[in-house]
């Protein structure tokens, strides 16, 4: 794990402890994997997360991953991004937004500055885009150029 991943996970572990939860193998594995899933995609489905945990040698059951993710979302440590009929999960430690291809479900993180004008416009009409004060970000749905040309 790189220093930046550690820097992302340590505050999450402190939040878990403040909430009275232990830093179990399952919770730490999920946090480490979410921190590792940075860059272009940055978010994982439950199955992607579970498979990545197994690949890293973390002994955890799929039935454990679900409640761990639910706890992390409830605490504001993680957030969700709907992609088609599934949900993806990412760390909610920095303000960022998401672009999702409606055809293939590909997702990319966008920096907060990328849609600052849209966020300002939403606030101007009384819509707060940061639910519960957490940096959950906004989701922009569309199609990649490659998907638009193949759909014709």
Image: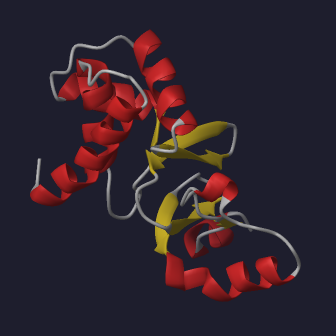
Dividing the picture into quadrants, the one containing residue 116 is bottom right
Residue 102 appears in the picture as rendered: no
Dividing the picture into quadrants, the one containing residue 148 is bottom right
Q: Residue at x 30, y 21 (%)?
A: 22
Q: Position of residue 99 (x, y in %)?
A: 58, 66
Residue 103 vs residue 127, the one in the foreground: 127
Q: Residue at x 27, y 53 (%)?
A: 8
Q: Position of residue 144 (x, y in %)?
A: 59, 70
Q: Quadrant of the C terminus?
A: bottom right
Residue 108 vs residue 22, the one in the foreground: 22
Q: Position of residue 124 (x, y in %)?
A: 83, 84
Q: Is residue 126 left or right of residue 110?
A: right
Give the farthest residue toward the right: 125
**Residue 113, above or below 54:** below
Number of numbered discs on residues: 0
Residue 77 appears in the picture as rendered: yes
């Amino acid at each position: 794990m790189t220093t930046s991943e550690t820097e992302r996970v340590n505050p999450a572990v402190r939040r878990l402890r403040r909430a009275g939860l232990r830093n179990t193998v399952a919770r730490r594995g999920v946090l480490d994997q979410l921190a590792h899933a940075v860059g272009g995609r940055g978010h994982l489905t439950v199955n992607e997360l579970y498979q990545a945990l197994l690949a890293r040698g973390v002994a955890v059951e799929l039935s454990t991953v679900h409640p761990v993710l639910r706890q992390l979302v409830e605490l504001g440590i993680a957030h969700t991004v709907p992609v088609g009929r599934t949900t993806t999960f990412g760390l909610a430690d920095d303000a960022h937004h998401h672009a999702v291809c409606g055809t293939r479900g590909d997702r990319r993180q966008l920096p907060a500055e990328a849609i600052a004008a849209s966020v300002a416009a939403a606030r101007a009409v009384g819509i707060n885009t940061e639910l519960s004060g957490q940096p959950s970000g906004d989701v922009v749905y569309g199609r990649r150029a490659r998907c638009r040309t193949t759909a014709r």
